[in-house]
Amino acid sequence: MNLSQLKPAKGSTHSEKRIGRGQGSGHGGTSTRGHKGAQSRSGYSHKIGFEGGQMPLQRRLPKFGFKNINRVEYKAINIDTLQSLHEKNGCTVIDIQTIIDAGLASKNDLVKILGRGELKAALEVHAHAFSKSAEAAIEAQQGKAVKL
């Protein structure tokens, strides 16, 4: 077998419908467009979502909700992640650059420390925000929670 012998699987391709090539083809006359009306004319185009005059789906469904333009999006990092970072690198100060280098956040992310997990080391943690439980857990181990 070589490249010149390749062909599509049987039944996977269809011959093109040749429209407007005489009555004998079965697609002559109106060329499958029906009689009269906008859709039979050349240059016809419809609006996006047009359903032939039926109320379109986007108008049948109710509007709801809103997007708060003042929302601040944080990258959440838990205390157990900080503990594993400390065990891996042996660092006592965990700042934004350490978190970025570990691949936990990108340089444009705002970082918030959350309280899931257990902290066993005294760490100085620099972040944009802390949950109450995370701040309490860090300070319980004689660590420091520094807000940026």
Image (cartoon, grey):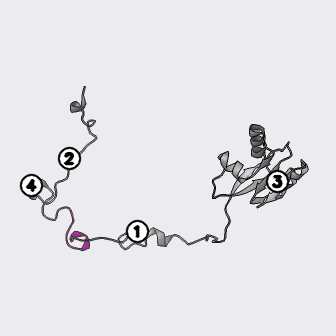
Please tell me in which quadrant of the rendered image residue 127 appears: bottom right
Residue drawn at (22%, 69%) of the image: 40
Counting residues from the N terminus, which is met first, the one under dot 3 or under dot 1? Answer: 1
Camera-side residue: 75 or 59?
75
SS of the residue under disc 1: loop
Question: What label does residue 49 carry, if any?
Answer: 1
Q: Which residue is mark 3?
A: 134
Task: Classify mark 2: residues with Cα within 10 Å, few (<14), some (14-19) or many (20+).
Answer: few
Question: What label does residue 24 carry, if any?
Answer: 4
Query: How many numbered discs?
Result: 4
Counting residues from the N terminus, which is met first, the one under dot 1 or under dot 4? Answer: 4
Q: Which residues are magenta?
A: 32-40
Q: Are marks 3 and 2 in contact (CB under 8 Å)?
A: no
Q: Amino acid at mark 2?
A: Ser
**Magenta segment: does it hold 88?**
no
Dominant secondary structure (helix, strand or loop) of the stretch shown in magenta: loop
Counting residues from the N terminus, which is met first, the one under dot 1 or under dot 2? Answer: 2
Task: Classify mark 3: residues with Cα within 10 Å, few (<14), some (14-19) or many (20+).
Answer: many
